[in-house]
Every structure is written in C-alpha cells, then in structure tokens.
C-alpha cells in the first residue's frame, strides 16, 4: 500500500533537449534558416582570414582589373575600380549584422520591458506606454532615418539609432498582448499570493513565457532590419565609402547595369539570402514553439 | 475552540457596464456571507459556478477587495491587506487547476523557491527546504529539476501543495483541488491532505462542487447559492436532513454508485419529466401552488 | 455471437511521437447491441477516448495508426469499407454528442444555421433532398424533442445567448437530426454544473429509451455509468479489464483495477476515510 503512494516518473522520460532537437532536426525550414544564419555570422567574423583579397576593403584602386566578370580568381567579379566583390560582400555582411545586433540589442530589452510594464500594471502605466507606442508605430523607420540623416549627418550610427528609436514598438505590442493574457493566469496569481515581488513576477514568471514569441519575432526582425539598413545605404544614408556595405555596393553597381550585372546583382543576392535565412529561421522557430504550446 | 478565520458580512458587488464603460447595474457575487473556521477543522464551501465560492477565496487571499464586510484572521482584521508578507505566511491557497497554477517555463524547484525567497529564507537553505517539502508531499527530491509538463496531474497538484506549505501556513484554502484529477489520483491527493492536516495541525477551507467528496472531508459545510450561504451546519446533519431546497436539489443531482446512496438522495418533483432548475424550485416553493404542494407530500 | 449493432473486434492502435511508438490500444473488443445502453469507463490514459475516436473515424493518422482489428457496424467493417460509405454512416446512422458545449458550436452562426447545414449535408450524403422550410421544421421538431420550451426562439439564437445546459441540449439535438440508431456520447455534461449535468443525463436516457436508440456512453465517472447504462466495459491501459451488467459490476467487481476504482469513489453516505494516520512521512 505505502509503496503506491510515491508516484514514480514515467519509465521512458525523454529530455527536453532531446525533444526539442528531434523536432528541430525534422523541420527543414528551421534547419536551412539556421545554417544560413550561422554561415553568415561565421563569415562575417572570420572575414579577414577567409576572403581572397582582404586588402580590397579599403580605397584600393587597380584599373587593370576593372569590371572583370566572375572567375576562379574573383568569384563575384570586380567593381569599377578593380576590387574583388566577393571579399567586399563578406566584409559587407559585418555591417549588416552589426546593424541588426545594435538595433535589436536596443529595441528588444526596451520594448520587452515596456510591454511587460504596460501589460501587467494596466491603468495609467498602460495608457502612457501604449499611446506612445501607437504614435511611434505611425512613423515609418525609413522616413525617420531620412529625417535624422537630414538633420544630423548621414552616417551609420545615426541611422542605427533612428531605426532603433522606432523598432521597440513592435516588441512592446507583442509582449503587452502576451502579458495581458498571462496576468490573470493562476500561476501569476499563485506567485502573488506567495508574496513574490513585482520584479520577480514580471521577469521570472511572465518573461520566460514570452521567450518563444520573442525569439521568433527577433529572428524575423533581423531580416527586416538588414533590409532597412541596405535600403538606407542604397539611398546614401548609411555607411560611407570606401567601407564595404551591401546596400552601397548595390547602389554603385547599378550604374553599370546591365553590362556589368554582377556588381549590383551579386551583393543584392547576398542581402536576399541573409534576410531569407533569418526569416526561415523565424518561421521554423514559430513552428517549433507552436507545437510546444499546443502540447 | 478558537476560530482561526472569521468572515463577517462579506459582500462583493461587481459593476455591470455598458459598451462605453458606464455603470448600468451591479451583480451581487457575494452577498452578506458570514462564517467562521475553527482551528484544525475543515470547513467546506459547496456551490456551483456563479455561487461566489471562488470570489470568497480570492478576497481572503487578498486578490480582490471586498465591497463591504470584514475578514478576521486570528482575531486581526486583515480586510484589504493585500499580498502583505506577514499575512501570506498564515494563509495559502492551492488552486483548482495544477496545469495552470504552475509556471510552465519554470522548474518545480524554482516554483517552490518563490515563497522561500519572498519570505526571506537564506538562499543557501533553499535547496534543502525544497527537497524537504517534496518529501512532505511524497515526491522524490529529483523532481525539483523537472518542468510541469513532465509531471502527471496528481504530481503537479502535489507540487502546488508543497509550494503552498513552503511558508508554513496555518490556513490552507483548497479551491477544487482535485476536480481536474482522475478519481484514483483524487483519492491519493485527499489522503495526502488529510495526513498533512493532522501532522501540521492545518486548518482547511475546502471549496468544491463535489458533494460526495465534501461529505467525506469537511467537518462543517456551508452551501452557497447565488452569493448567499443558504444552509450551514455539521456535514453529516446537512447531508442527512437538508433543509433548503437548493441543498436538496444539489444532493439529488449527484451521480452515485450504490443503492444506499441513492436512498439518501432527496426526491425532487419533476416538471415535464425534467429536473427543475434551482430558480424554478425556489420560486415554486415560495409561491406557486401546484408543484410545491407535491413537494410537501 | 449475437449480432450487435456496433461491434469492435480486437482493435489495436499505435501512436508515434518523437520517433517513439506507443501501443495505446492492445486488442479492444466491445459490443453495442441495438437498443442497449452501454458504458465505456476509464481514467485518463485508459484508451477510452481513442476507442471512441477510432469508431467515429476521427483519429488523425499519423500520429495514430490502426494496427489491427475490425469495427463492424450493422455487419460491415468500417475500417475496410470505402471512405465514401463510411462518411455516409457518420452523423446519420451513428452520431456523436460532444463533451464541450462551448467549443463544439460555432459562435458566429445561429443554432438554426448550424443545424440546418448539418441536416443539408446529411440529406445530401443519403441522396435525399428537402427544402429549407422542411429543414427548419425538422430543426424545430428536434429542438422540441430535447425539451426546449420555445424551439423557434432557440433556433434563432446565437450560441452565446444560451446557457451551458441549453447548449449541451442543442448538441444532443444535432446528434438526433438525421435519426441515427446509435448515439456515442463523450462525457456529456462534464463541463457543466452538477445540477445541469443531472438534467442532461436524464434527458439523454429518456431520449434513448423513447426512441429505441443504442447508447455508447464514454465517461470517467462511475456514478454516470450507474445512472445511464445497463452494461459496462472498464478500460485500463489500453485493454478492457472487465465487462458485465452494470448492477453486477458495482455489487461484485472481479478485476483488481475495477475494485480499486470503485473503492476510490467517495460516497455520499460518508464513511470513505482518507489518509493513513501516521503512516505517511
């Protein structure tokens, strides 16, 4: 009799990590996305060592090698001053990824905290934060960046800050809606009755339940931020030459279309592939987490 | 013979609002409810959805403020003392659904540590206390590293009980603690609650719609209907000779498994071959002639 | 062997999740004769719901896979008949009363719309046809059969305008629409209050008796078994552990699991003692 009182664990207990890995590895979208993202990050970090012509990053001029088509020596061809486009694309990834990192590094913590506060406390806190969010949401990031560049000087830092100053709103909206649902859940009430602090409830009880949604949103956003950054550079508001940037390369290469198509098309493809990688990863993560939520 | 909890004329009104937020009326969720719980006893609140039983629990826990009335704990008036820590030590609650009362993203150990940290137990002792508490609810200590979804319903409810006991409360509010569980699991959880009650000298406020369970667990019972306690008394006498129509209807509705139980269920007059609702029954009793006379036969 | 209306023979079902295979039904057999009231009782994980879903053809494959056995309805094996024929039986010869009156009705259509649509498709499957007026007449008739005092008003209502008990009765009415011979009820009333549940069970029992239907009641509640059935199958861990006339089962259970299950039910008369004084740590 007494031995029955201790409920034993189910005999074949699968670890969480194994279950997650099992589902992840059987989700082609997520795997392809993850591979692209990891390769892009590695390439960006190791750029000086893996590129065939790392010196072509700067203001190098080699008129004898102008406008060469893709070949074994120059994989993506050369540009109008004879620099290796492949090397410059790989270095350009650094700027794109740095942009995503900085913008989201500011937007995610700010947006999440504001969303948690608005969703949990309600009342005037909610009114102030959410109306501010509504206002910020009404301004397109590109327009904001143009305005900032016009007032200050057109450079990368200003563009990043301009985008980050608006991007948090999306995270605020997301976290706000999740928190509002979780606020009335029994486990939150249980924590309240057990005397837990507001800080504990917000960051230890509610936040972990937002992580899956945040991961999906952030991954998708990386792709968007990279596109917005490329658009800014294309318009001449981003990084200034000669530092390689994918958007700038598309813009300068477009002057030589269609004869020297590789000068703009191949950097453009690089933007496309990286943005696609992040989007696939985000979609894959969503599928992964959806299953978990349903279970 | 001391009362640990006294509820005096507790009332909670919820405003009914129109589409523009204007108040167009009020709902009496809890209507002038008074009762007292003796130390070491089990008081049962029986009622269906909308009876106000959960609202009463929430008010005692400080999750909702009463419109009027007093809540006295150990003689001190704690009305409106929401979430205060000294108070949290004395009263704790076990929620109805163990699936949603444990945070799905936190381990069992982390959940049990919440009250320990909140009430200032030294961090170094947490691990030790968590395994003691798990042992108290008859779970192995290695459950501390598991997530709720890896546990069965009964195990989750044991964890919820351990968490509630972490601060050594005197009064435990049990809000339908076994309604989400299988009957054999329910029996084991009830065993645990009875044993813990004896060992720790706990007082229980047991809230349930399950009258068969109530009969075997509560010392005193109060029957709630539309926010009012319509009948109260020692459990055995309320069940054997129910005085109020609603109590009779509730008893008549319980599905039972033996002839003896069937014999003790009140006979309720049928209207059009249908069991009347409580409103009908009470309205009929109050005035209309034909059916209420049949009741009196 | 007597010719039963529904006969499940040695049914096996597997589920595959995360690459692991679980045999959830290990050769389940049960018979539902015409005009009989059968209960299938078990706790969570017993396989009663999987059995019910296999009968109704509601198992999702994958992750489920039927590994063996037959399900005969009126002498024809449901598992081997063409999908079209099987669809024809569903909702017309055998119907299902769902458990949750909140999620089983579509909130944006009136009861008349929803019942009318069901009737239209049932008619189409059976190659019948009737006009909209006749369909509405049938809807009102069935709502009257489930003891709705004002069927026209209920038919015009949206689900949100009805109480839980009324919605559950609408679900029963839906199951009765095309005059099935067999009703499969999945824990009806569990989501409702005790007093409402008692009404629903009484109504179901009356209807089944009045109209000469067979009832297969899927439940976890032994009280419900006693009140609604005259023959019972007890399931545990994918097998039927005991099956007998209901009255006999409660008087003298044979199987250990059944005994333990009955012993665990608290009695309204009292005397169920919880706790083992001093035994637990």
Image (cartoon, coloured by chain):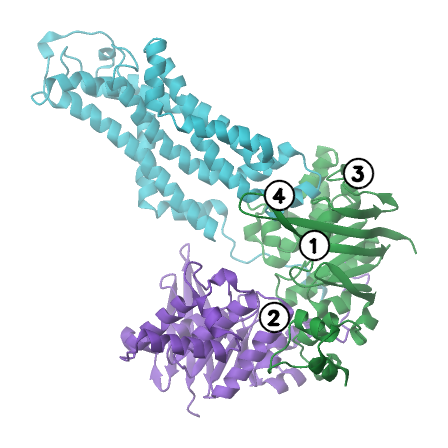
The green one among the chains is B
Residue positioned 75% across, 36% down in the render = B119
Q: Which residue is mark 1?
A: B28
Q: CA gap, disc 1 to disc 4? A: 26 Å
Q: Check the residue under mark 2 and report the chain it is in.
A: C
Q: CA gap, disc 2 to disc 3? A: 42 Å
Using the rendered image of the protein, determine whether residue C36 is visible from the camera's viewpoint.
Answer: no
Residue A92 sits in which quadrant? Answer: top left
Q: Check the residue under mark 3 and report the chain it is in.
A: B
Judged by depth in the image, the label closer to the viewer, 1 or 4, is 1
Residue B5 lies, in percent from the top left, at: 83, 51
Q: Which residue is mark 4?
A: A188
Q: Check the residue under mark 4 and report the chain it is in.
A: A
At label 4, counting other C-alpha atoms closer than 10 Å, the crowd grade (few under 14, some 14-19, many 20 or more) is many
Judged by depth in the image, the label closer to the viewer, 2 or 3, is 2
Q: Is residue A283 above or below residue C174?
A: above
Q: Check the residue under mark 1 and report the chain it is in.
A: B
In this view of the protein, which residue sits in the foreground, B53 or A68?
A: B53
At label 3, counting other C-alpha atoms closer than 10 Å, the crowd grade (few under 14, some 14-19, many 20 or more) is few
- Badge 1 vs badge 2, beta-carbon distance below 8 Å: no
Q: CA gap, disc 4 to disc 3? A: 20 Å
Q: Colour of chain A?
A: cyan
In this view of the protein, which residue sits in the foreground, A189 or B17?
A: B17
Q: Which residue is mark 3?
A: B86
Residue placed furthest toward the left: A259
């Amino acid at each position: 009799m007494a031995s029955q009182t201790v409920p034993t664990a189910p005999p074949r207990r699968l670890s969480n990590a194994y279950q997650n890995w099992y589902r992840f590895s059987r989700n082609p979208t997520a795997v392809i996305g993850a591979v692209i993202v990891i390769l892009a990050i590695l390439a960006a970090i190791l750029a000086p060592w893996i590129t065939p012509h790392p010196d072509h990053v700067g203001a190098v001029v080699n008129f004898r090698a102008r406008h060469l088509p893709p070949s074994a020596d120059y994989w993506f061809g050369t540009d109008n001053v004879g620099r290796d486009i492949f090397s410059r694309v790989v270095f350009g990834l650094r700027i794109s990824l740095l942009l995503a990192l900085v913008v989201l590094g500011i937007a995610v913590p700010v947006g999440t905290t504001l969303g948690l506060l608005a969703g949990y406390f309600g009342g005037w806190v909610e009114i102030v934060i959410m109306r501010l969010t509504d206002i910020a949401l009404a301004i397109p990031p590109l327009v904001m960046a143009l305005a900032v560049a016009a007032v200050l000087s057109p450079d990368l830092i200003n563009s990043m800050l301009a985008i980050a100053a608006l991007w948090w709103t999306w995270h605020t909206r997301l976290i706000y809606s999740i928190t509002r649902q979780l606020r009335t859940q029994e486990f939150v009430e249980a924590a309240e009755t057990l005397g837990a602090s507001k800080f504990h409830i917000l960051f230890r009880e509610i936040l972990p339940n937002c992580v899956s949604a945040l991961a999906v949103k952030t991954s998708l956003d990386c792709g968007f931020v990279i596109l917005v950054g490329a658009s800014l550079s294309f318009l001449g508001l981003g990084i200034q030459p000669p530092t390689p940037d994918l958007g700038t390369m598309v813009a300068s290469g477009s002057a030589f279309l269609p004869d020297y198509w590789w000068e703009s098309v191949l950097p453009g493809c690089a933007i496309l592939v990286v943005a696609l990688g992040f989007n696939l990863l985000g979609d894959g993560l969503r599928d992964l987490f959806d299953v978990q939520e349903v279970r | 013979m001391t009362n640990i909890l006294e509820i005096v004329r507790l009332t909670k009104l919820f405003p009914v609002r129109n589409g523009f937020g204007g108040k167009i009326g009020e709902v009496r969720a809890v209507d002038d409810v008074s009762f007292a719980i003796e130390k070491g006893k089990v008081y049962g609140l029986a009622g269906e959805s909308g009876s106000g039983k959960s609202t009463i629990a929430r008010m005692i826990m400080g999750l909702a403020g009463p419109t009027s009335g007093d809540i006295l704990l150990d003689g001190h008036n704690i009305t409106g003392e929401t979430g205060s820590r000294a108070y949290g030590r004395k009263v704790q609650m076990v929620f109805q659904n163990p699936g949603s009362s444990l945070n799905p993203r936190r381990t069992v150990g982390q959940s049990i540590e919440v009250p320990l940290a909140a009430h200032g137990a030294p961090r170094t002792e947490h691990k030790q206390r968590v395994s003691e508490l798990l042992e108290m609810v008859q779970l192995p200590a290695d459950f501390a590293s598991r997530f709720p979804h890896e546990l069965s319903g009964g195990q989750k409810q044991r964890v919820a009980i351990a968490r509630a006991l972490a601060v050594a409360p005197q009064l435990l509010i049990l809000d339908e603690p076994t309604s989400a569980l299988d009957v054999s699991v329910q029996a084991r959880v009830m065993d645990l609650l009875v044993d813990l009650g004896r060992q720790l000298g706990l007082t229980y406020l047991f809230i349930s719609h399950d009258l068969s369970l109530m009969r075997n667990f509560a010392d005193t019972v109060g029957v709630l209907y539309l926010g009012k306690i319509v009948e109260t008394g020692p459990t055995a006498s309320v069940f054997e000779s129910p005085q109020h129509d609603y109590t009779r209807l509730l008893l008549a509705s319980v599905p039972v498994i033996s002839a003896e139980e069937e014999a003790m269920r009140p006979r309720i007059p049928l209207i059009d071959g249908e069991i009347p609702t409580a409103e009908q029954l009470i309205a009929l009793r109050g005035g209309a002639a034909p059916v209420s006379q049949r009741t009196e036969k | 062997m007597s010719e039963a209306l529904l006969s499940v023979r040695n049914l096996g079902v597997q589920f595959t999740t995360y690459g692991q295979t679980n045999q959830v039904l290990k050769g389940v057999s049960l018979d539902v004769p015409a005009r009989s009231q059968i209960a299938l009782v078990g706790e969570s994980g017993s396989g009663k719901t999987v059995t019910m879903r296999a009968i109704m053809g509601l198992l999702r494959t994958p992750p489920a896979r039927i590994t063996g056995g037959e399900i005969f309805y009126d002498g024809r094996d449901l598992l081997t008949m063409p999908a079209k024929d099987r669809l024809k039986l569903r909702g017309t010869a055998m119907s299902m009363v769902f458990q949750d009156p909140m999620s089983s009705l579509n909130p944006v259509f009136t009861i008349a719309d929803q019942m009318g649509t069901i009737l239209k498709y049932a008619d189409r499957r059976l190659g019948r046809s009737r006009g909209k007026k006749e369909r509405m007449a049938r809807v009102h008739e069935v709502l009257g059969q489930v003891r709705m005092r004002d069927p026209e008003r209920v038919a015009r209502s949206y689900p949100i305008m009805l109480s839980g008990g009324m919605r559950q009765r609408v679900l029963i009415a839906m199951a009765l629409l095309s005059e099935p011979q067999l009703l499969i009820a999945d824990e009806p009333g569990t989501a409702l209050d005790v007093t409402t549940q008692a009404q629903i069970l009484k109504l179901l029992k009356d209807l089944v008796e009045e109209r000469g239907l067979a009832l297969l009641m899927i439940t976890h509640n032994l009280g419900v078994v006693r009140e609604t059935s005259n023959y019972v199958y007890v399931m545990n861990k994918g097998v039927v552990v005991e099956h007998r006339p209901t009255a006999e089962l409660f008087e003298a259970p044979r199987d250990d699991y059944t005994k333990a299950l009955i012993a665990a039910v608290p009695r309204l008369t009292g005397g169920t003692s919880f706790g083992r004084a001093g035994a637990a740590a």
